[in-house]
Amino acid sequence: MKITDIKNSKLFDFAADIRNSRLFNLAISLLFDNADIILFFIIIFWKLISYEKNISSSFVPMSVRLAIAASILILISFSLILKKKSRISFLYTVDIILSLILIADLMYYRYFKDITTVAAIKNAKLLKGVSASVTSVASVKDLWYLVDILILVPLKRKYKKAEFGIVPMRRRLVSFIVILAVGVGINAKTFYRVSKEQPTLLTAMSNRIYLTTMIGDVNFHIVDSYNYISTSLRNSKKLSTDEENKIKTFLQNNNNTTGETNFKGLAEGKNLIVIQVEALQGFVINQKINGQEITPNLNRWVNKCMYFDNYYYQVAGGNTSDAELMSNNSLYPAQSGAAYYTYSGNKYDSIASELKDKNYYTAALHGNTEGFWNRNVMNKAQDFDDFFGEHSFDASEQIGLGISDESFLNQSLEKMKTFKQPYYSFLVTLTSHYPYEAVDKYGSFDVGQYKGTLLGNYLQAIHYTDAQLGEFLDKMEEEGMMKNSIVALYGDHFAIPKDNINQLFSFENESRNDDYAWFKYQKVPLLIHFPGDKYAGVNHKYTCQMDLYPTLANLYNLPKNYMFGKDMLNGDSEKVVFRNGSFIDGKNLYVSWTNTYYDLATGNKISETDALKKEKEEYTKELEYCDELQNHNLIKTFDQQKTN
């Protein structure tokens, strides 16, 4: 057919009629009048889908795409109340805010493997000292979330100058109600599905990553804000007697010491020295690189200690401070943010407080500023007699965030020599802190092909710290301090973030790259040394940071009242519960963010049984009990009830 034939055809006439019709003109007018809304929806939808793909390796299913679309419709609905020019400014501002939130969420996820919350934002001032850690996980790709904001500036100005008809307030209200109803309706269906699958997930938010991948980031922050406000209001009211009694009964059962006779009171009257080592992860123990031991000193001391090689860290948003909280109190980290900040006004039944009742002198020592992680307040709340922070030391030798481990440990040892015996010393090291950039100060340790990588830098940092720990322990032994002391040494949390896990898998020749493999390496070493190197040996039992205090309480014959962990030297429980709802029971691993179970022995995925489902519900309830204990300062309440 010739072009002239097309022009003369009825089809061409029909197309021309459409272009000239009122309906066509109305459609074009509607598209132009609402170009800001359409563009906003497309841009934000793309950003949210991109974000989902960054935190989840799986395809974003249609149900999640619908939830994301619904959350955008809810945001758009509020703009419909406004006049056109105000609406454009509103949508542009929301775009900026959401883009910044997504970038912050991605950076937080890469470092903490978690999602930011209102409580975490409240702790933002505590991140001042770890700015290098935060910026080190930033990516140039994150700038894509901001590109449209710059491009839209001239378009926004030009569009706002265009002439638009005045839309009556009544019509704007109707549009607002209709679009809001559609968004809320879709979300209601999504939330119902999630609540049926995991009944407490939306309220407890114990599994924030999984929840985000199910409902989208905007919905997550809406739910988080709602929960934060409602929790704050609820916590202002007294917990019911029935709820208090449930928590009290759980604690009584969990802290029942009947039958716990192994090592009972063995350490009574002896000094207690606990050393929390920054980012000491279990894979470096007895490991070599280029024929050199990474931690030769700790390897030597492992042979002189009771060594737990399946000891898991359980930190959450409070990171290092969470490890301190759990080790000293056997309380889970805060549901969101840092307990050291959120619950600093609470009463604690800590190791320090119980040992003080036995006339012990108690001291916490750390080479960072006193106010970091609110330690100056929390160490007092935990009943330490003294807290020696940066200002209590000669701080001239600095590496990374504070005093070098060499200087800190040497000075701490001199202070400990002056302590009135018996004493409890709680030391927290610092030099091996992420992102391990002070390589010129770590000494010469050849990491071969890993030089310049995050893993290589970490191996150099932890090799340096190992040398200082070896010198510290050797000096204690040489000066006879070990004869009347129990020493416990453990790592506080991960060293290699999930964002860099492939480097670790390569180093370990790990063939798998899944959640099972990830958990396999989320262990930290625990060494407990007894005078005369007694009871040395390897314990393969599954244990965790929540278990340290109950174990020490048994050794020092301390009362057990408010502990959520277990005694590692008595009983056969191998319960390890993580703040995000994942757990290990000695035979199985449950990964909360994918709702998947693995057989620990084989690594194979297994189906959920009634027994496993019950276990999951029990551990979720346990986390909730600890939250309520902290939210309502129940240790203080229960102690008062005992004295009345």
Image (cartoon, helix red, strand yellow):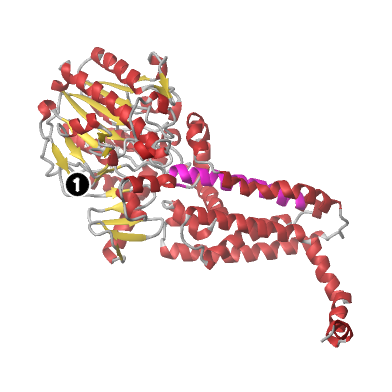
Q: Is residue 111 magenta?
A: yes
Q: Which residues are magenta?
A: 88-114
Q: Position of residue 282 (x, y in %)?
A: 28, 40
Closer to the camera, 454 or 636?
454
State the quadrant of the C terminus: top left
Residue where numbered disc 1 is placed: 541
* Residue 353 visible, this angle: no
Q: Is residue 273 magenta?
A: no
Q: SS of the residue at dot 1?
A: loop
Q: Position of residue 97 (x, y in %)?
A: 64, 46
Q: Position of residue 612 (x, y in %)?
A: 28, 61
* Residue 156 visible, this angle: yes
Magenta residues, dominant SS class: helix
The residue sitting at 29% across, 58% down in the picture is: 615
Closer to the camera, 520 or 628?
520
Categorize mark 1 by other alpha carbons within 10 Å: few (<14), some (14-19), many (20+): some
The residue sitting at 57% across, 53% down in the picture is: 218
Q: Is residue 148 left or right of residue 621?
A: right
